[in-house]
Structure formats: structure tokens, C-alpha cells
């Protein structure tokens, strides 16, 4: 087996079904071998999209997603997506090409210090130097990506490790020339020794093995103490975040445990949709007020970062239980009363078992529910406001009504997606994807691609700010070529509105924040997709339905919706 085939065998053993890539001479043997193994090789138009797609795959399946990029600029282009995955604690594996081992540091094409570039953004990095080490290094990368706090892993595979031994020997022999002088003979000797080292041990038959990773468990004492705290509490509250879904395949069990806990719940990130579209315990609005009132807060896979005002949203006097795989995240900005270091999902399951059946705090739940309903009524009132074009609040009410039960929403943008997050109701566990704490614009196309492949039967809606769409519009080319029926809804307000809002208010100038009412739907059509433009609310529902039909027939679609200005996000902060 050549090196590419070894890598492909390891991917297959880990259950990887798609390999996201943008080709390059350094990685060709891997792409060819992956295809031969039956993996779907999906080539995109920017390496960042390949890594975003791998990230989405990981979040939805629990199996690390995999991207392969070529040496040098292929790796540099992947960095933002890699960092996003690191901060979102998403377990992916990035395979990077590299210059031939003997030519590194000698001015070879695309030869840079990739280790220095990538190391700060991954939890595992291996520069492979021998063919025999390719398989084990990749297996280790899988295990490391999933272990403890999940995150990205990087394996650098120089091109001369990926081709078969005979070709590489011949290549190095030709590089050694035919000269008879001492230095020529010395060079040939050095290259011969180098080649021998590259292939040392590679003659033994190769068996791909899966890397093993365990689920970290919080100590029993932490479960018992948290159970006591919750049992005593009068106004308990639970906030569940992405990390609690690190074991994606356990989502249904986690949902069941939350129901049994009987504690009102706020869901964020990948946890959105965990309790379905409507659930009596699931609160969607006024989280800050609820947190301020609560006397016992369980943060499951959630850190006290800016989203909880650095921990200030939780009362000082409240019992704070932090269940987190990361000891650092559990204590970020606020020392919890109980730190349960381990998998937060598993922790909740054990907690529910320990507590058994208990009477619900009906009064507390009703108070929160009443507040939630009040906010929903306010949203309805705002949705009814008519303007010249489309009111985004009305748009999302309509989309929520039209999207299928198996819809999966991908969010990429500023105000537009923040508005969506208040209104769209993810239908089921793992049906919402957003960038996470890094707040990266540009995740959309890659996420949608990964989602569509991980859930081929689902309807994938990409909620796209017009600004954000610019990072990934070219992936409509990939959607069309690979028949990925994503439905993108672009919120066209001709502005980077989330930034413009504060910049204009604080500094009195919108410089750098304005866009045009660009015909994004025509761009999509240019790539061979369906494109629709909606300028008025009355056209919206009909168009969204047509978009659904097109996607159901296998065609990617872009709906370009002209938005009115709205004050829905007034007063929200973005720092
Ligand atoms: C890669 C990246 N660049 C810049 C930003 C800063 N930023 C945050 S929100 C935003 C505006 C987004 O505009 P758009 O996608 O059109 O959504 P809108 O706010 O207009 O609804 C910008 C530029 C960012 N978060 N990520």
C-alpha cells in the first residue's frame, strides 16, 4: 500500500464517509486512494470551506470530520476554520500536504514552517517522517481529537511519503543524477540512505486500526453534591451548551435525562433543538433575567464567557454547578460551587438517575413560561410591522412555519442570524449549526456542505447575512457539481448591519460597513443553481416553497431577500 492508501484505510476504519478537500499535487495520492476506498471526495473552492465542512460533520455525527489540504497556501487558508473548530471544541482531523522530506528548507515549492503556523490552533500535531508512521499517526490524531476537550488535530504528510516506494526511489535516484565525481556519489549515497529511512518498516503488511478515546467522567461525589443542590433549590435552572453534545449519538438520551430532571432549560449552540420545537421545560427568551433569579444554576458544557457576561448573569448567592470537560472552562471568570470535570451530557444522565422522580417547581416554571410567551407575543407584533421590503422578523416567522420537520439550520451572519436565533425553532437534536464562540463569519457554505452530507435526507437551510455570504458564495459551484441541495436565504440589507449599528451610533460614520443590494441569486444561477429574488413580503412564502421544492429535487437554491431596516437587535452588544 502506498502512503495515500494507508491514510485512506485509516479513514475508513474510523467510519469516515466524506473527505473534504481542495486538490494539490502534494495530496493527490490520498484523494485517489480515498475514492478507491469508497469515500466521497468533495472538492471545494477554498480550503476554509473544507475545514468548516469537516467541523460540521464532526458536530453532527460525533465522528471527527476530515479535510485534506495541500502544502503551504492550502494550510494557511485553513487556519481560520481550524481556530474556529478549536474554540468550538469540535473534533476534526486536518491532513496537510508538505514538500518532499529531502527538499524541506531548500526552497521547495510551498515549503513553509507549517508546524509553527498550525501548532497554536490544534490539540495534536504530528509531522510524519516515515511511511510506516502514517497510519498510526492518523489513528492517534482521531483519538486525540475526540479525547478530553475535543478539538482539531493536524497530521502533516510530505508528498514523498504518499507515493509508492518504487516511484519515490526512482525520483530520488534521478535527483541524484549520473555524475561520477565525489560530490555526486556522496549525494546519491545520502539520497539512498534517506529513501531507505523513509520506507523503513513499510514492507510489513499494514493493518489500519482505530484510535481509541474515552469519555471523561465527573467523580461520583460531584454528581451527589449537585443532586443535593438541585433537590434543595426552589428556582433551579439549567443551561446546556454545545460541549454537552460532544457525544453526538447520545443526544436522545441526554434529552430524556433533561426531561426527567424537570428543571427549566436554556439551550445554546449545538444543544439547540435538543428538546424539540416546543417543550414545557424549554425556555427561549429572557435568559439573563432567569439566571439572575435562579438559586441554583447548572451550566452543562457552558463557560462563563462574554455570553454570560463573564459569569455576572448568575447571582453571587446562587449555587453554581459547572459540568465541563475542561477544568479551565468550568472555572472561567467564576469559581463554581461544584465543579464536575467530565462529560456534561453524561453528568446530566447520572444526575437524573440519582434524583429520580420529583415534583416540578410549577410556579417557577410557569413564571418563566409566562415571560417566554410575552416575548413571543412581542415578536408576533414586530412581525406584523410592514415596510417597503421584507421585515426579517416576519421572514423568520414564515421560514419557521415552512421548513420541514427534519430541517437543519446553519447560521452565518450578524444581526440577521441573531434575529433568526430568537425566532427559528430547531426541530430536533443537532439541527442547528453556528460558528460558536469565535463568531467567525464565513462558516456557512462549509457547514451547510458538511451538514448536507452528514444528513442526506434533511432539508438544509443556510441563514446567510449578505456580508457573510461573500465568504462562501463560490461554494455554490461545489454545491452544484456535487449535487448538494442547500437552500440559502440571504438577508440582503446592503450592510454589515451588526457592525454598522454600533459604529454609526458611537462614531457617527458608517464607513466600511455598507454593501450594495447585490443580485446574489444571479451569482448562484451563474454557478448553475436556482436563484430567486424576494423584494416584498407577499412574494416570500411562495418563493420559500419553491425553494424547498427545488432542493427536494436535488438542486441547490439561493433566495435573495431584500430586507427592511429593523430595530429588533437594537441595544444588543457584539463584543
Ligand atoms: C471573519 C469575520 N470578519 C469580520 C467579523 C466582524 N463582524 C461581525 S458581524 C459582522 C456583520 C455581518 O454582516 P452580515 O453578514 O451582512 O449580517 P447583518 O449583520 O448585516 O445582518 C461583521 C463584519 C467577523 N465576526 N468575522
Image (spheres, rainbow, N blue to C red):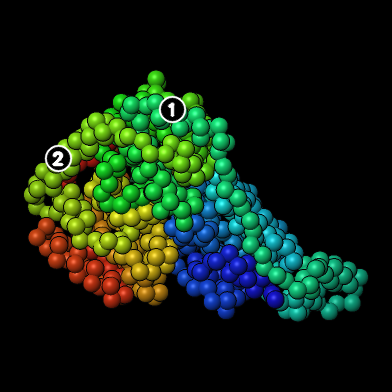
Q: Which mark is residue 378?
A: 2
Identify the residue shown where x is 14% and y is 66%: 542
- Residue tagged by mark 1? 229
Front residue of 454 and 7:
454
Front residue of 18 and 299:
299
Element type at marker 1? helix
**Can residue 486 be seen in the rendering of this structure?**
yes
Is residue 265 depicted above or below 210 in this figure? Answer: above
Front residue of 449 and 61:
61
The image quarter containing residue 191 is bottom right
Mark 1 Cα shell of 10 Å, populated few (<14), some (14-19), many (≥20): many
**Can residue 55 be seen in the rendering of this structure?**
no
Q: Which mark is residue 121?
A: none
Identify the residue shown where x is 81% and y is 68%: 200
Identify the residue shown where x is 25% and y is 73%: 550
Q: Position of residue 429 (x, y in %)?
A: 37, 54
The Cα atoms of the two marked residues, 1 and 2, are separated by 35 Å
Amino acid at each position: 500500500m502506498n502512503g495515500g492508501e494507508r491514510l485512506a484505510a485509516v479513514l475508513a476504519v474510523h467510519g469516515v464517509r466524506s473527505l473534504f478537500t481542495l486538490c494539490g499535487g502534494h495530496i493527490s495520492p490520498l484523494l485517489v486512494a480515498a475514492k478507491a476506498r469508497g469515500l466521497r471526495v468533495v472538492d471545494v473552492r477554498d480550503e476554509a470551506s473544507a475545514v468548516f465542512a469537516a467541523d460540521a460533520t464532526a458536530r453532527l455525527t460525533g465522528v471527527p470530520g476530515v479535510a485534506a489540504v495541500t502544502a503551504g497556501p492550502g494550510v494557511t487558508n485553513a487556519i481560520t476554520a481550524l481556530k474556529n473548530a478549536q474554540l468550538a471544541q469540535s473534533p476534526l482531523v486536518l491532513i496537510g500536504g508538505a514538500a518532499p522530506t529531502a527538499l524541506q528548507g531548500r526552497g521547495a515549492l510551498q515549503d513553509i514552517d507549517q508546524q509553527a503556523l498550525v501548532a497554536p490552533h490544534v490539540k495534536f500535531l504530528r509531522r510524519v517522517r516515515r511511511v510506516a508512521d502514517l497510519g498510526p499517526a492518523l489513528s492517534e490524531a482521531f483519538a486525540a481529537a475526540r479525547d478530553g476537550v475535543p478539538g482539531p488535530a493536524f497530521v502533516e504528510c510530505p508528498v514523498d511519503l504518499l507515493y509508492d516506494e518504487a516511484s519515490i526511489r526512482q525520483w530520488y535516484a534521478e535527483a541524484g543524477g549520473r555524475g561520477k565525481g565525489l560530490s555526486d556519489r556522496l549525494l546519491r549515497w545520502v539520497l539512498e540512505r534517506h529513501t531507505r529511512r523513509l520506507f523503513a518498516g513499510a514492507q510489513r503488511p499494514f493493518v489500519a486500526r482505530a484510535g481509541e478515546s474515552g469519555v471523561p467522567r465527573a467523580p461520583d461525589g460531584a454528581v451527589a453534591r449537585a443532586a443535593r443542590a438541585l433537590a434543595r433549590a426552589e428556582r433551579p435552572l439549567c443551561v446546556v451548551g454545545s460541549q454537552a453534545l460532544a457525544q453526538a449519538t447520545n443526544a436522545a438520551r441526554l434529552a430524556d435525562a433533561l426531561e426527567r430532571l424537570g428543571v427549566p432549560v436554556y439551550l445554546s449552540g449545538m444543544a439547540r433543538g435538543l428538546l424539540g420545537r416546543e417543550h414545557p421545560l424549554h425556555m427561549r427568551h429572557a435568559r439573563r433575567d432567569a439566571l439572575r433569579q435562579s438559586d441554583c444554576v447548572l451550566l452543562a458544557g457552558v463557560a462563563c464567557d462574554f455570553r454570560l457576561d463573564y459569569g455576572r448573569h448568575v447571582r453571587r448567592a446562587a449555587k453554581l454547578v459547572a459540568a465541563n470537560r475542561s477544568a479551565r472552562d468550568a472555572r472561567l471568570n467564576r469559581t463554581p460551587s461544584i465543579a464536575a470535570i467530565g462529560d456534561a451530557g453524561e453528568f446530566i444522565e447520572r444526575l437524573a438517575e440519582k434524583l429520580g422522580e420529583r415534583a416540578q417547581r410549577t410556579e417557577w416554571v410557569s413564571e418563566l413560561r409566562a415571560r417566554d410567551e410575552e416575548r413571543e407575543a412581542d415578536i408576533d407584533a414586530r412581525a406584523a410591522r410592514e415596510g417597503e421590503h421584507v421585515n426579517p422578523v416576519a421572514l423568520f416567522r414564515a421560514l419557521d412555519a415552512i421548513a420541514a420537520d427534519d430541517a437543519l439550520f446553519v447560521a452565518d451572519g450578524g444581526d440577521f442570524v441573531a434575529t433568526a436565533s430568537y425566532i427559528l425553532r430547531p426541530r430536533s437534536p443537532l439541527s442547528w449549526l453556528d460558528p460558536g464562540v469565535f463568531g467567525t463569519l464565513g462558516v456557512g457554505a462549509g457547514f451547510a456542505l458538511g451538514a448536507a452530507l452528514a444528513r442526506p435526507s434533511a432539508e438544509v437551510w443556510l441563514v446567510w447575512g449578505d456580508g457573510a455570504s461573500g465568504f462562501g458564495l463560490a461554494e455554490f459551484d461545489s454545491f452544484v457539481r456535487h449535487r448538494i441541495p442547500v437552500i440559502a436565504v440571504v438577508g440582503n440589507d446592503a450592510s454589515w448591519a451588526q457592525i454598522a449599528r454600533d459604529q454609526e451610533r458611537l462614531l457617527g460614520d458608517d464607513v466600511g460597513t455598507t454593501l450594495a443590494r447585490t443580485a446574489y441569486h444571479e451569482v448562484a444561477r451563474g454557478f448553475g443553481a436556482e436563484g430567486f429574488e424576494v423584494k416584498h413580503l407577499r412574494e416570500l412564502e411562495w418563493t420559500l416553497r419553491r425553494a424547498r421544492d427545488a432542493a427536494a429535487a436535488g438542486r441547490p437554491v439561493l433566495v435573495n431577500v431584500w430586507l427592511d431596516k429593523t430595530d429588533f437587535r437594537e441595544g444588543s452588544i457584539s463584543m
